[in-house]
Amino acid sequence: NDVAARLDLAHRYLDGGRYDEAVAEYAVALELDPDNAEAHAHVGLILYSAQRPEEALASVDRALETSPDYPEALFFRGHILLCGLDRPAAAIHPFEEYLAAAPFGAERSTVERLLADAERGVSRSCPT
């Protein structure tokens, strides 16, 4: 019944590429705390990795409903819009919001590169 422990375990599974187990732990975390932005955002990341960008965006948007300035969710949203849905103009705002919310964030250089591409209307920096 410990949300933090469930999230920690889910992150470890995610880092190890054990996506099914990660999703199961995030699901338990969401049963315990249905508004947990971290769990919703990371479920979105897993859905994006599974090439389900529309569902991924919905999950990330749910995270942002709960926590509008959650940096990882902002990064994931911009990335999904740019790289998964090819909507560069829509990706600009979440990337700018990420930079404002986490000026020294771990994804800063990636976001700056993706933002520049989004502003040019291209998705060259997206992984293949």
Image (spheres, rainbow, N blue to C red):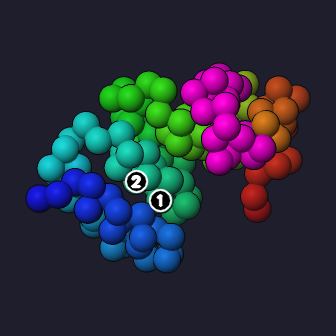
Q: Which residue is mark 1?
A: 46
Indicate the position of residue 3 as horizontal and vertical percent values.
22, 54
- Is residue 59 visible in the rendered image? The answer is yes
Q: Residue at x 64, y 41 (%)?
A: 105
The secondary structure that most of the magenta stretch takes on is helix
For the magenta stretch, what is the residue range?
90-111
Question: In this rendering, would 94 be left or right of 14?
Answer: right
User: Which quadrant is the N terminus positioned in?
Assistant: bottom left
Question: In this rendering, would 18 be left or right of 3?
Answer: right
**2 w.r.t. 79: above or below:** below
Confirm or deny contact between disc 2 and disc 1 (CB under 8 A). Answer: yes
Indicate the position of residue 50 as horizontal and vertical percent values.
52, 63
Q: Which residue is mark 2?
A: 43
Going by the numbered disc 2, the residue's amino acid type is: Val
- Is residue 54 visible in the rendered image? The answer is no
In magenta segment, residue 62: no
Indicate the position of residue 8 as horizontal and vertical percent values.
35, 63
Going by the numbered disc 1, the residue's amino acid type is: Ile
User: Which quadrant is the C terminus positioned in?
Assistant: bottom right
Question: In this rendering, would 94 be left or right of 17?
Answer: right
Q: Residue at x 71, y 41 (%)?
A: 108
Quarter holding residue 95: top right
In magenta segment, residue 109: yes
Q: Which mark is on residue 119? A: none
Towards the viewer: 122 or 73: 73
At mark 1, the secondary structure is helix
Q: Residue at x 36, y 72 (%)?
A: 20
